[in-house]
Image: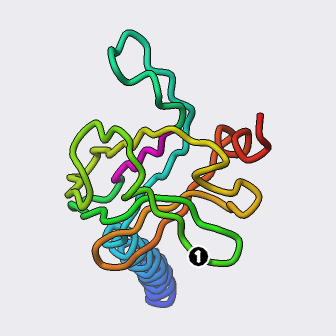
Amino acid sequence: MVDDLNITLIIAIIGAVCGVSGAILGVMNTWHQLRQNRIRLRIIPQHVFPVGAIGISHVNFGIEVINLSDFPVVITDVGFLLHDGQRATLSPVRGIETNGSLPLRLDPRTSYSKWFYMDQSILDYSATKCVYARTQCGNVVRGNSPALRQLLKGL
């Protein structure tokens, strides 16, 4: 027969396992909540080759901003971040904005694209670090890609 000492030991082990499991699940839930409330954007610099579009053959580069957050985000500025910390904005650069102009509200899982003509007269490539997008609440998210590295090398 099982005596009282063994029953107490079994209950203590079950309690310890449940307590550790509860602590782990609590930490995971807190991490998930913090991650869910954070602004998540993907900034993708890319080469643009308009095919079959009449009148937009003068574009060669673009920046795409994708909202990966679970809530809408307002994008106010898109451009290049320079090595000295300054920003070279694209707002005054003539280009094509495929789904509206800035500032623009991006719903969850939607994107904004800015296409434009890029050359050395617009921006000094040697001073450029990466591309960025700024939200209405002041968050700045950076992005990089092989297309941007190729552009900065002057290829």
The amino acid type of the residue labelled 1 equals Gln
Q: Position of residue 154 (x, y in %)?
A: 77, 40
Q: Quick check: 149 above or below 22?
A: above
Q: Residue at x 24, y 61 (%)?
A: 103
Q: Position of residue 10 (x, y in %)?
A: 47, 79
Of the 4 image quadrants, the one containing the C terminus is: top right
Q: Quick check: 34 above or below 141?
A: below
Q: Quick check: 63 above or below 125?
A: above
4 and 129: which one is in front? 129
Q: Position of residue 23 (x, y in %)?
A: 43, 82
Which image quadrant is residue 77 in? Answer: bottom left
Which image quadrant is residue 142 in? Answer: bottom right
Q: How many marks?
A: 1
| Mark 1 Cα shell of 10 Å, populated few (<14), some (14-19), many (≥20) | few
Q: Residue at x 73, y 47 (%)?
A: 152
Q: Is residue 121 left or right of residue 50?
A: right
Q: Secondary structure at mark 1?
A: loop
Q: Quick check: 39 above or below 119?
A: below
Q: Position of residue 49 (x, y in %)?
A: 51, 22
Q: Residue at x 25, y 64 (%)?
A: 74
Q: Which residue is identified by label 1?
A: 86
Q: Residue furthest front?
A: 121
Residues drawn in magenta: 62-67
Q: Is residue 28 left or right of residue 76?
A: right
Q: Is residue 50 left or right of residue 118?
A: left
142 and 7: which one is in front? 142
Which image quadrant is residue 26 in? Answer: bottom left
Q: Residue at x 44, y 79 (%)?
A: 27
In the image, residue 65 lies in the stretch drawn in magenta: yes
In the image, residue 2 lies in the stretch drawn in magenta: no
81 and 108: which one is in front? 81
